[in-house]
Amino acid sequence: MALDAGGFPATRSPGGVVRSAAGARTLEVLDQRVSGCYACPRLVVWREEVARVKRASFRDWDYWGRPVPGLGPADARIAVVGLAPAAHGGNRTGRVFTGDRSGDWIFAALWRAGLANQPTSTHVGDGLELTGVRVAAAVRCAPPDNAPTPQERDTCNPWLARELSLLPELRVVVVLGGFGWTALWPVLAAAGYRIPRPRPAFGHGVEVDLDGPRGPLTLLGSYHVSQQNTFTGRLTEPMLDAVLDRATEVAGLRGA
């Protein structure tokens, strides 16, 4: 596992220079460093194997096969945090939530909320632009069976912590699923936010207000946009829209 002196996941350039989340001063630099991370051996093996073997329907694709950075502007007031890239979604396209059914749901919802200029995200360069929102994952590599380990989650946390710190206008975090909800608490605690005890349980529509060094921050829980939720009706479009509507209201983006 490659870590820097402060315990942050680190990458090494061909010249052997260690670069980590801690030293990234802009989202662009952070995204470059995220995409070069090799901190979790199991995830590295899996993401590269998937990229080599491919799915038959995507055999003509040149898979990304690396960690997937976040997407969205530095002035975002809302962050949407998911679980991890899909093996044949983000791990294929190189863009978070892009190229799978979960992405179809979240980007269509962002479009309906006025946070995206189009309802689809199929590949890098397809014209998608986000406004007021940044989308990221708690774990940046596609995991086997869509199930990162707690250690992999914790190792990846500094990337998310740094990403949120580089969003100076951040007011709301929409968390998709219980895994991301669990991952976020140590990230926020390390950033100086006052965490309630006991920690609030995850649930769809749960809302938690926190005080921190940059002012108030609101967490909103939503069931994940996974097929096991959307196909069964556990999560519906109106349910997801209601969470994003509340997020835009709290962030001051409604009608902006």
Image (tube, helix red, strand yellow):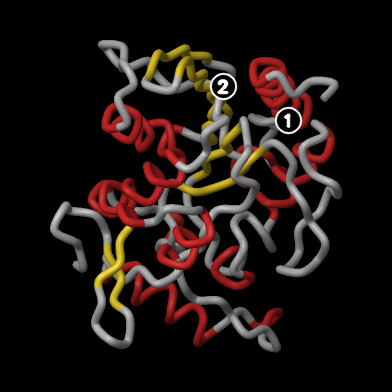
- Tell me if mark 2 has few (under 14), some (14-19) or many (20+) residues whose alpha carbon lies within 10 angstroms of its own: some
Residue in view at x 43 percent, y 80 percent? 48
Residue 11 vertical position relative to residue 22 in the rendered view, above or below: below
Work out whether mark 2 precedes mark 1 in sequence or the reverse, and give the earlier one: 2
Residue in view at x 70 percent, y 19 percent? 252
Q: Which mark is residue 177?
A: none
Given the image, on which type of amino acid does mark 2 rest? His
Determine the CA span between mark 2 and mark 1.
11 Å
Residue 139 vertical position relative to residue 202 in the rendered view, above or below: below
- The residue beneath circle 2 is 204
Given the image, on which type of amino acid does mark 1 rest? Thr
Q: Residue furthest left?
A: 5
Q: Position of residue 153 (x, y in %)?
A: 32, 48
Q: Nearer the viewer, residue 256 or 198?
A: 256
Asked if residue 246 lies left or right of residue 171, the reply is: right
Q: Position of residue 1 (x, y in %)?
A: 19, 67
Asked if residue 120 lies left or right of residue 59, the reply is: right
Residue in view at x 39 percent, y 56 percent? 24
Residue 37: name its quadrant.
bottom left
Disc 2 on helix, strand or loop?
A: loop
Q: Quadrant of the C terminus?
A: top right
Residue 58: name its quadrant.
bottom right
Q: Position of residue 23 (x, y in %)?
A: 32, 56
Q: Position of residue 102 (x, y in %)?
A: 66, 49
Q: Nearer the viewer, residue 222 or 214?
A: 214
Q: Which mark is residue 236?
A: 1
Q: Nearer the viewer, residue 45 or 121?
A: 121
Q: Nearer the viewer, residue 146 or 216?
A: 216
Disc 1 on helix, strand or loop?
A: loop
